[in-house]
Amino acid sequence: MSDRAPSSADPKAPAQQPRSAFARGGDRADIGQESLLLHASGRPGKIEVVATKPLTTQRDLSLAYSPGVARPCEEIARDPSLAYDYTAKGNLVAVISNGTAVLGLGDLGALASKPVMEGKAVLFKRFADIDGIDLEVDTREVEEFIQAVRYLGPSFGGINLEDIKAPECFIIEQRLRELMDIPVFHDDQHGTAIIAAAGLINAAELTGRDLKHLKVVVNGAGAAAIACVELIKAMGVPGDNVILCDTRGVIFQGREDGMNQWKAAHAAPTEARTLAEAMAGADVFFGLSVKGAVDQAMVETMAEKPIIFAMANPDPEITPEEVKAVRPDAIVATGRSDYANQINNVLGFPYIFRGALDVRARTINEDMKIAAARAIAALAREDVPDEVAAAYSGRRLRYGPDYIIPVPFDPRLIATIPPAVAEAAMLTGVAKKPIIDMDAYRHDLLARLDPTAASLQAIAAEVAEHPRRVVFAEGEEEKAIRAALAFRNAGYGEPVLVGRAHRIAETAAAMGLGDLDGVEIHNAKLSENNAQYTEFLYQRLQRKGVLERDAQRMVNQDRNVFAACMVALGQADAMVTGLTRGYYQTFEEIRRVIDPKPGARVFGVSIVVARGRTVFIADTTAHEVPDPEALADIAIQTAARARAMGHEPRVALLSYSNFGNPTGAVSQRMRQAVELLDARRPDFEYDGEMAADVALDAQLQAHYPFCRLSGPANVLIMPGLHAATIAGQTLDKLGGGTLLGPVIVGLSKPAQIVGMDATVSDLMHMALLASFDSINAS
C-alpha cells in the first residue's frame, strides 16, 4: 500500500493553486520559517563585498594600496570630482534606517531593520547594478540621525532613507537634502508616490479623464500618503480637489486636533468630515492605510469608472473582488503581486538612483520624480515583448484596465526610467556630469543586467500558471523537505517526497516547518505501485543482464529508480535528486528508466552566472570524448537552451588552440564540428576552434578579424567531459558567481540532478527547470 501523508486534495485532480505564497491560510508562518533558514544558511545575511581589481601579487597590492594609492588620493584632494573616477563612490548608495517604521511591523529598532536594509541593497544590485551598503543608525533623535548621515556624504553617491517613521522622516529628508550635495531619497515616501502617479496617469487616460479635473481622496496621512498628495498636485491635480484623511477623518481647513505642519499643508476646503462622505462622487481613491478601511458602500458612491488604488500591505483597504462586485467599471490597483496592477516600489527606486548617479545629480527633485512617473506610464502603453509576456503568462499584458503599470521583471525598465530621470536632472540644472549621447547610454544600461534572472522569473511564473507534480527522490533529507514545502508554498504545484512518512514528519517538525498538508509521501518499499514499476523496469532491462528480482530490488530500494518510474509512467511530471549520491551514479540510475527524446542527445549544460554575465558550458555530464557529430549536436541543443533563457547564443567550440595554432587531435575534432555546423546552417553565431580566453574576450578576438563572433561567447562547447566538468566545478568553487546545473538536456521525461552540496535554492531552481521542461513537452 502507499505510505502517504494526509493531502488536502486528490493528487490526480487538477490542482487549484494559490495566486501567491500568502494566499493560503497559514502559509505566512511557513514563509517566515523558510526565510529564517535562508538568511542563516551558508554565509549569514544576503550581501558581501567583492574586490573589482586583482590583488594577487605584491605589485597588485602596491598599486591598490600603499604606496601607489597615494596618487589617486592626491588627485582627489586637488579635484574632489575625481573621486567618481578613482573610487566606487559614483555607483555606491547607502541604505540607511533607524528602524522606527520597519515594513508594517512598527518600531523594531535599528538592528532589527538590518535584514530589510540588506534586502534593499540586494534589490539595488539586481535591478540597476548599483552597489548598496546598509547602515543602521541607532538613534531615534532626529538631529543625531541627521548629523550621523550628513558626515557620510564623501563615501557615497546617494542616500536611500528607509523605514523611518513620520513625521520625523519629513524633517530628516528635508534637512539632509539641504546639507548634502548628493541625492537623498526617502523611498517609503517617494517610491510609492511615483509608481502610484504612473498608474494614475494611465488610469485617467483609460477612463477619459484629465488630471486637472480629478477629484481625489487619499486615506492615510503618513509619509507615503503625503508624498502621493504632493506629487499628484505637482503633476496638475488641483489642490482643492484632493481630500486627505487620517484616523480622525477628513483633514479640512480649520481642523485643529491631530494636526501637524505636513497635514495642515494639505487641508482641504470641504464640508466632508468622514472618509465615506469624502468618497461620494470622487474619481480616485488612494489607500495608504489599513485593511478594511473601505467598504463596498463607499465604492458604490464614487463617480463613474472609479479609480481605486488600495495600497495597504499585506492586505488592501478593499480587495479587487469586493470592488468589482459592486463596481465592475472600476480600475483597481493594490500593493500585492497576486493581483493585476501592483504598485511596487521596485519599479522606481533602483532606476531613479541609476539615472541620478549617472549624471552625478546633486539631488532628486520633483521634475525627476515626475519624469520617472511619466516614463513608467509610457512603458505600460507600449507593446509587451514576448519574454515579459512569458513571465506573466496568466495575465493578459496589454495596456488596459488590468495592465496600467509595467511588471517588475520587465527588462525594458532599465533602459526607460534612468534616461528620463537623467534628462530631467540635466534640464533642471542639478546634473554635474551631463550625458551627451543618450542612445549610447541606453545601450550601456541594457548591457548592465544579465537576462538570466528575468528568465528564471519567467520560468517560475509559467510553472505557477501550469502547476506540476514534482518528485523529490530523497524525501527524508532536510533540504529536500524544505524545497518541497517551498515549492508548495510558492504555488508551483504538488511536491512528492519519496521516503518514510514518520521520518519526514519528524524532520519537518524538528525544523519548525509546519504541516505537510499538500505534500504527498511515498515509501518506495511499501508502495502499491511496486509491481507496476517492477514490470516496467524488467521489460526495459531484461536483455541487459537484469533479472526480475533485480528489477524488483531496484524499485524497492533505490529512490532514484522509484522516482524515475513515477515520471516515466506519467504519475508525476518531473523529478529532482542528487543530494545523497554522486552525480554520475545518479545519472545512470535515471537513464535506466528514462530514454532520450527521439533524435536528441542527452547531456548536461552548466550555467555559470557571474558579475552580470551568463555562460553556458557543455557537455558536463555524458560524453567523455564526443566526436564531431556529437559536438555539433550539443552546440545546437545548448544554443536552443540559451535562447530559451533569454540569451542570443554566441557559440565557441573550445580547444587549447586558436584556429589551427597549434594543431592536434582535439583541435581537429573541433574544426570538423564547425564544418558540420557550416553544412547545417544554424540560426546562431558560432566559431572555433578557439581557446577559452579568446572566446570570452572581445579584445583578444580582435587579433582574429575573421572570427565570426560579434562579441564574447556565452555558449562554450568543450572538447571533452573532463574539460567541461573541471571548468564548471572550478568556477563554482572559486566563487564570485552562481552555478546552475548541470541541467540535463535531451531526456524524454524531465529529470534533474543537483550536487551533494546543493542548497535549497539549488533544488528549487532545478525543480522549476524540470517543471518548465514538462510544460513545454506537454
Image: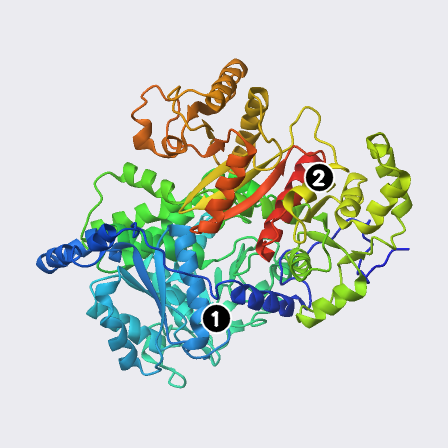
> Compared to 480, does 711 lie above or below?
above
Crowding at label 1, few (<14), some or many (≥20) Cα neighbours within 10 Å? some
Instruction: Give the residue type that dot 2 points to.
Output: Glu
Q: Which residue is mark 1?
A: 103
In the foreground, 587 or 10: 587
Q: Residue furthest top?
A: 679
- Secondary structure at badge 2 equals helix
> Compared to 632, does 522 lie above or below?
below
Q: Earlier in the sequence, mark 1 or mark 2?
A: 1
Q: Nearer the viewer, mark 1 or mark 2?
A: 2
Residue at 48 percent across and 78 percent down: it is 106
Instruction: Give the residue type that dot 1 points to.
Output: Leu
In the foreground, 153 or 323: 153
> Compared to 207, does 676 lie above or below?
above
Residue at 34 percent across and 19 percent down: it is 706
Q: How many marks?
A: 2
Crowding at label 2, few (<14), some or many (≥20) Cα neighbours within 10 Å? some
Q: Where residue 234 sits: x, y (%)?
A: 31, 60
Dot label at residue 553: none
Whether residue 320 is visible: yes
> Compared to 324, does 582 lie above or below?
above
Dot label at residue 588: 2
Residue at 40 percent across and 29 percent down: it is 691
Residue at 46 percent across and 72 percent down: it is 220
